[in-house]
Image (cartoon, rainbow, N blue to C red):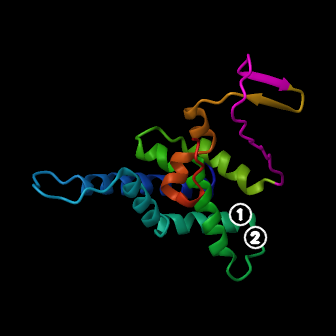
Amino acid sequence: MDTTIGHALARYLEAVKTEIQNRKSAARPANVRLAVLISENQILLHAVEHAEKGQEFQDLVREVAAAYYPEGLANGSLSTLSRQSGDFFRLSGIYCDLFDDQPVQANEQLARFRSSLGARTRTITYYAPIEWVYFSKETIRFGEFEIRFLKTAEMEAIFSNRIRRIFYPWARVSVA
């Protein structure tokens, strides 16, 4: 990584990984007869909340602000940028990948993060449940749209319900 944002991101991801590992270890004490067990979702949530208050995250947000808003940010905008950056990392699944010990490529994440910072357009997808109707095919295409039969696991992934369950429980979508 050749940029200051890239270096700040790599330091932040390493700090998050360390925080998650520390919290996992602390949540499962050895040689203890009685302990309050914390769910994995709570471990991850608390680790992320702590990491997003840390120096590495603040350094990353400052680097982003300097690169994308060189004229300076209005009063309070740094906290907005901080919240938006945190939301990006939460919604991207990076934190879940780190929790699951999956490899997270800082260069890839930097490209995705930069793309999100510079995005001027959005793609909006609409989902409309159709109940009690059965088709002979799993997918029927109609040019601009399609009707698809989705399995429960597919819907859970589409709606990012694991991420929502951990970070945004009020926004979880019932796939039932």
Residue type marked 1: Ala
Question: Which mark identifies residue 105?
Answer: none
Please give the name of the residue rendered at 23% of the width and 52% of the height, measured from the top-left corner.
28
Q: Looking at the image, which is closer to me, 161 or 101?
A: 161
Which segment did they paint magenta?
Answer: 120-141
Q: Amino acid at mark 2?
A: Pro
The reply to whether residue 52 is in sight is yes
Is 105 covered by the magenta stretch? no
Q: Where 126 falls versus 146 (above or below)?
A: below
3D distance between C-alphas at marks 2 and 1:
6 Å
Element type at mark 1: helix
Residue positioned 83% across, 24% down in the render: 141
The residue tagged 1 is 67
Q: Position of residue 111 (x, y in %)?
A: 67, 46
- Of residues 11 and 52, which is closer to you in this image? 52
- Please name whichever residue, 132 or 141, is drawn nearer the observer in this view of the structure: 132
* Picture coordinates of residue 83, whole percent (x, y): 61, 67
Residue 9, position as x, y percentages in the image: 55, 55
* Percent position of residue 35, x then y: 18, 58
User: Outermost residue, right direction?
Assistant: 143
> How many other residues sit within 10 Å of disc 1, few (<14), some (14-19) or many (≥20)?
few
Q: Judge left or right: residue 90 versus residue 31.
A: right
- Residue located 49% across and 50% down the image: 95
Up-down relation of residue 67 to residue 93 (above or below)? below
The residue labelled by disc 2 is 70
